[in-house]
Image (spheres, coloured by chain):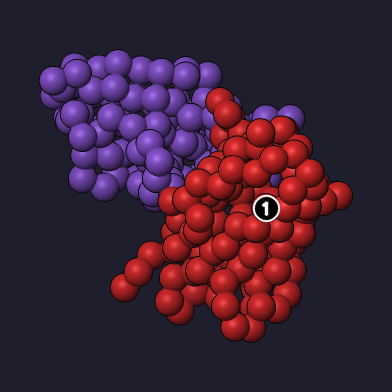
Chain colours: A purple, B red
Amino acid sequence: DQQVKQNSPSLSVQEGRISILNCDYTNSMFDYFLWYKKYPAEGPTFLISISSIKDKNEDGRFTVFLNKSAKHLSLHIVPSQPGDSAVYFCAASARGANNLFFGTGTRLTVIP
Amino acid sequence: NAGVMQNPRHLVRRRGQEARLRCSPMKGHSHVYWYRQLPEEGLKFMVYLQKENIIDESGMPKERFSAEFPKEGPSILRIQQVVRGDSAAYFCASSPGGHYGYTFGSGTRLTVV
């Protein structure tokens, strides 16, 4: 049972444009959401997070939006840069839980 | 200020052999988490340990897999009698407390031949 879903395996965007990566979840107990970035042969690196009490969190070029009623979150990267090319994982956790639930990832390619 | 150190980076084992994966958490981190990533899938939680204690092993297969985090030394994920389906990337993460401040290691890629 995949509780966190990233339905787009890949995304290509021109440099300078906006990248929008989407994530859906099914468990209404999730109250904290994270985005990780992963380069080949490396571990995931934390990018940005959002608590369920918020609907937006911004950090530089990265903004995460949370729509609780739709059980949907998205990561916006503006402007996109070639160095942003990586696999992006959405993850979620429930209050009191010990682990994160990860999506299957979206491979972002930013074309120079 | 080394990050989470995992070794080996790559491990090849024949079916039936044992695999030992090691993880040294970041300095000051006493919480260790193991995740497995099968090809074309996301990371899946396996086990959560604190020093000398297994806190949550709900994601561990019931047989052949075990984990420890001794008082001294790294955390060890042990897979006995490996099978082809164990081929995956195994990631360790550590945190000072709770999972909000996870730092992941670079992973061990296990290949069973």
Image quadrant containing the N terminus of chain A:
top right
User: Callout 1: helix, strand or loop?
Assistant: strand
Q: Nearer the viewer, residue B65 or A111?
A: B65
Q: Nearer the viewer, residue A110 or B14?
A: B14
Could you classify mark 1 by the number of other residues whose Cα lies within 10 Å: few (under 14), some (14-19), or many (20 or more)? many
Taking the image as shown, residue A19 lies to the left or right of residue B101, namely: left
In the figure, residue B37 lies in which quadrant? Answer: top right
Taking the image as shown, residue A28 lies to the left or right of residue A12, namely: right
Residue depicted at 73% across the width and 52% down the height: B18
Taking the image as shown, residue B92 lies to the left or right of residue A15, namely: right
State whether residue B49 is above or below residue B103.
below
In the figure, residue A80 lies in which quadrant? Answer: top left
x and y percentages locating residue B50 in the rendered image: 65, 73
x and y percentages locating residue B96 in the rendered image: 50, 73
Residue depicted at 45% across the width and 56% down the height: B105
In the figure, residue A57 lies in which quadrant? Answer: top left
Residue depicted at 30% across the width and 16% down the height: A12
Which residue reaches farthest right?
Answer: B63
Q: Chain of mark 1?
A: B
* Residue hosting label 1: B19
Taking the image as shown, residue B42 lies to the left or right of residue A39, namely: right
Amino acid type of disc 1?
Ala
x and y percentages locating residue B24 in the rendered image: 50, 69
